Image (cartoon, grey):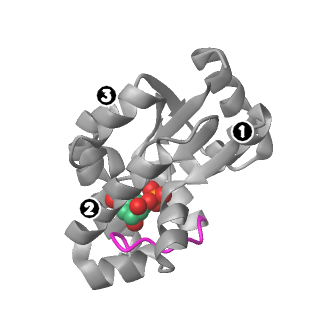
Amino acid sequence: MVRVILIGYMGAGKTTVGKALAAALGLVFYDLDWYITMRYRKSVSEIFAERGEEGFRDLERRMLHEVAEFENVVISCGGGTPCFYDNMEYMNTLADTIYLKAEPDVLAMHLKMGKGKRPLIEGKTPEELEEYIQKSLLEREQYYTKAKYTIDISLLDTFTKIDECVRIIREMVKI
Ligand code: S3P
């Protein structure tokens, strides 16, 4: 049975790499944010607006407990998922957890390239965004580094780079 959970900061490439990894392994892919959106029929931004961050984190934890029980899956979780409650320990007991580690400038580039709305960084100027990433990444690394595996991610702007990343993960986790 294979169960892989990708963790890392917003814009690290969890969804991009997760989809490619699942396709390469012939497994089903789940993105925790999408799962939440599907179950609640609301976007993450709407849930933040209605319930605040605390409400979102509670719901995120409950949805994690559903998804992380599935078998033969690749799951990408939200950037904040490992940093609340005992989520990181919980994921480690059930899955091969992989931290997609990227430098702040790579994260900022991916976030600027991406189309998804993210309530925590909405409306920030490029300078504010870089400052926010630097500060919160520093706080979050203590959780991310609890993952069983870490892979360094550079700018994922070509399919070749995404494939290379998938190859490294498969070699590292032996899947
Ligand atoms: C968050 C990351 C988002 C989403 C929410 C909060 C965070 O997921 O869960 O906006 O706290 O870092 P992505 O990492 O997929 O953008």
- In the rendered view, does 75 fall on the left or right side of 80? right
Instruction: Classify mark 2: residues with Cα within 10 Å, few (<14), some (14-19) or many (20+).
Output: some
Task: Residue 45: give x, y in percent of width and height.
Answer: 40, 78
Residue at numbered disc 1:
27
Q: Are marks 2 and 1 in contact (CB under 8 Å)?
A: no
Q: Is residue 96 above or below residue 40?
A: above
Residue at numbered disc 2:
58
Q: Earlier in the sequence, mark 2 or mark 1?
A: 1
What range is drawn magenta here?
114-121
Residue 156 painted magenta:
no
What is the secondary structure assignment of the residue under circle 3?
Answer: loop
Residue appearing at x 28%, y 61% in the figure: 57
Q: Nearer the viewer, residue 107 or 33?
A: 33
Amino acid type assigned to the residue bearing label 3 in the image: Lys
Residue at numbered disc 3:
146
Q: Earlier in the sequence, mark 3 or mark 2?
A: 2
Task: Residue 42: give x, y in percent of width and height.
Answer: 47, 80
Would you identify the image quadrant in which residue 114 lies? Answer: bottom right
